[in-house]
Structures are given as C-alpha cells and as structure tokens.
Amino acid sequence: MPSTYMKSKLFRRSKVLWGSYDVWRPRLVFWAGAIAIGVISVVFAKFADWAQHAFHGLTESGRWSFLLPLLLTPAVFVLSAWLAIRFFPNAQGSGIPQAIAARKLHGAQDRARLLSLRLALGKILLTVLGLFGGASIGREGPTVQVGASIMLQAARWGGMAQARGLILAGSAAGIAAAFNTPLAGIVFAIEEMSRTYESRANGLVLTAVILSGLAALGLSGNYTYFGTASVTASGARDFLLIAACGVGGGMLGAGFSVASLRLTRRIRRWAQPEPLKRMLMLAGGCGLATAVIGVISGGATFGTGYEQAHAAVGGEPLPFFFFIGKLLAGFAAMISGIPGGIFAPSLAIGAGLGSSLSSLLGTSIALGAVLGMAGYFAGIVQAPMTAFVIIMEMTGNHQGVIPLMAASMLGYVTSRLIAPEPLYHGLSRTFVAQSILLRRSGAKTQAPTQ
C-alpha cells in the first residue's frame, strides 16, 4: 500500500498538472489568442473584399465614373496617411517590418509602440480604407502585424515571458490564416521573421498556426487561394521560361526593394521640417499617381490584383504591360505612408510578368503565372523557401514543385546580387532606431514616416 506521503505527493503533482490555475491560464489565453487571429483574419478579408468591390462599383457604373478615382483615390490616401500619423502611429506600411523590429527590441514599452491592440484595429480599418480608395495594397502583411499584436497582448494577459517566440507565432498564424497556407506560415516564421531556426519557439508557432487555421477553416471553409493549377515544365521552352521568370523576377524584385529603401530614407529626411504637412502632400501625390495609372490601365491596377493573378493562374493571358503598371502603383502605395501590404500586389506583379514571358515564348500562361510569382516574390522578400511553399499551397500545384523551387532560387540569387539587404528587414531598421531614440530621449511615442 502506498504511504500517506506518496499519496500526498501524487495528489500535489496531479493538481499541478490538471487543476492549477497558474498552469492553465497561460495555455488558455494563448489558445484563445491563436483562435482570435484566425477569426479576425477572416473578418478582415471580408471587409477588404467589400471595400474593393465598392470601389469598382463606384468607378465602373457610369459614363464618367472612370474619372472618379482622380478625386477619390488622392483624398483617401491623404485621409489614411493623416489618420495613421495622428491616431495610429507605427501602423504605416506593410506591418511585417514592425513585427520584425519588435522581435529585435527587448523592452515591453518599445514593443508596445509597434504591436498593440490599438494598432491592430487601426491597421485593419486603414487597410480597408485604402482598398476603398483603389490603393495597390494587400491585407496579408497587415494581418502579420495584427496577429503579432494579438499574441503579444495574450502574453501580457497570460503572464507568459516568451515575447519573441509569441510574436513569431502570431506572425505565422496571421500568414497561415490570411492565405489558408499553414506550411507557408511556418516557413515564413522561420525564414523571413527570424532568419534562424529557434527550436524553443517551434511548438508555439505550430500550435498557433493549427488553431488559427482551424478557426479560419470553420468560418470560410477549405480552399486554395488562387484555385488549382496542375502545371509543370516539360519541354525546352518551359525550362527557358523557368530561367526567365527566376532571373527577371529577381531583377524586378531587387529593383523595387532598392528603390523603396533608398527613397523612403530620403523622404524621412525631406519631411523633417514639417512632417505632417509634407507627408500628407506626398500621400496626395502618390494617390493621384495611383489614380492616373489605374485609369490608363482600365482599372486593372487598382486594389490587390487578386482577380488578375487568379485569371493568369487559370490560363488567361494578362495585358502585356500589366505588370509594369501594377509595379508602379504598388511602389506609389509603398512610399506614400498609408497602411497596407505588398504581399498580394507582388503576386499580381509576378503573375503579370510570367504571363508576358509565356506569351513571348509560346508556353503555358498558367505555368508562367506561377513561376513569375515565385521568381518575383523570392526577389522582393529574399525568402525562396517561403516563395515556393506559399505559391504551391495557394495554387495546389504539387506537380510543379521542382520548377517552383528553381524559379524561387534563381529569383533569390539574382536579387541578392543586386540588393544585399532584404526589403522587410531594411524597413524594420527604421522602427528599431526610432524606438531606441525615443527610449533615450524619453519623448512621447512618435511614428516614423515609413
């Protein structure tokens, strides 16, 4: 018979494992946070789709309605930039650089300037507003900042100390729920967010991706983002297409990254004497440029570009110079200072590039679209594994894994030769430097212009 001491010890151990509030509270809060990311991602997607449809409905329903963007788009850009500066500092841009910067910072107050529930709300509202104005932005990057903010708040409520790992988990859950790509969420967290494998955080990342993914599936069902494309390379022209999409996408992505980093640094210096006035002037000018490009393209460059990329993946050729117009519109949104991501527009640019190269070479448009997305996306973020995994999952194209890998690797290598600093990590330096400066000066929270 067990002694009284042994019974008491077993009872205490059982209580710790199964009945202790202090043990279960962090777990329950973490699980609730992951589920919340999935639910909010789906709601965010619904509002974003509504905003795009509302914009197209306004600008395509009358004889002169195509001219409406010349007024509406600049006004929305200015309003969005003003709201971001005045009420939601550090909500500007994609949101991924903020999450990366928060992982590099050590103080809770420094992280709170970049990731908070207030910023998450502002990010959603202003991204939807930008899409209502026809901005060439996406919701996927913002979902990363939203997911990281929710998980960091869960850490505060649950008394969890692993802030860096939880930011990683929230970011991965955001990508997974936004695209319905769980593997890409995990790879993105390892390759792009941390740039290293952190074994202590892998359980957090995997659990967050599973729970947020299940929540998103429960609300929107199982789907592939761009539909299904079963294409692969078979002939000499297809292999030439792989090289063209990889090298061409890498060059285009590197050019976008270098120009964005250099110009945003110059804009910050230029805006210093009168930051609010000058940033609003810049936003208005970028909005007008977006409107002009959109009117010239017949409305094709407005919004995320999802419809165009989806059509190309389905084998429908896009206008030959669509990718150039979309790139210029995306660049205008990037430097304007309004909240919004570059994930979805980048995929549309890559699909347009691949469609044009396929037309020149006389190969499959669908194959060119997926290879173009892989090459350009790997070129702009310099994360080749994330590029081919996310596109494989978004298109269900398991037959073309090797061509996707090749295009992604070529895009990455080409980009590294031209742009030594990845775009998101280059942009994150601004937020890190700003946080350090504020901490040293003891000043109130003030957002960088980008």
Image (spheres, rainbow, N blue to C red):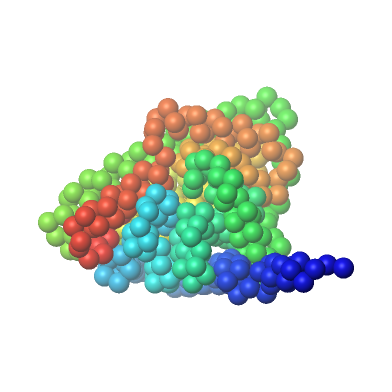
Tell me residue 171's x, y (percent).
Answer: 52, 56
* Residue 158 % position (x, y): 52, 70
**Measured along the vertical axis of the image, is residue 19 above or below residue 237?**
below
Residue 410 occupies which quadrant of the picture?
top right
**Which is nearer the eye, 163 or 70?**
163
Is 351 situated above or below 16? above
Identity of the residue drawn at 49% across and 45% down? 194
Q: Position of residue 172 (x, y in %)?
A: 56, 55
| Residue at position x 66%, y 34% in the image | 403
Residue drawn 31% across the image and 65% down it:
89
Q: Is residue 7 left or right of residue 246?
A: right
Residue 161 showing in the rendered view: yes
Depth check: 59 or 64 in front? 59
Please provide percent x and percent y for residue 14.
72, 69
For the view shown, which residue lies furthest in the top direction?
Answer: 236
Q: Quadrant of the C terminus?
A: bottom left
Quarter containing the N terminus:
bottom right
Within the image, what quadrant is residue 341 found in? bottom left
The answer to whether residue 158 is above or below residue 357 is below
List the single residue furthest toward the left. Answer: 273
**Depth order, front residue of 360/183:** 183
User: In the rendered picture of this protein, how many numbered marks are placed on residues?
Assistant: 0
Q: Can residue 302 be seen at all in this image of the molecule?
A: no
Q: Could you tell whether 229 is left or right of 309 in the image?
A: right
Residue at image coords 65%, 27%? 239
Q: Which residue is outermost to the right?
A: 1
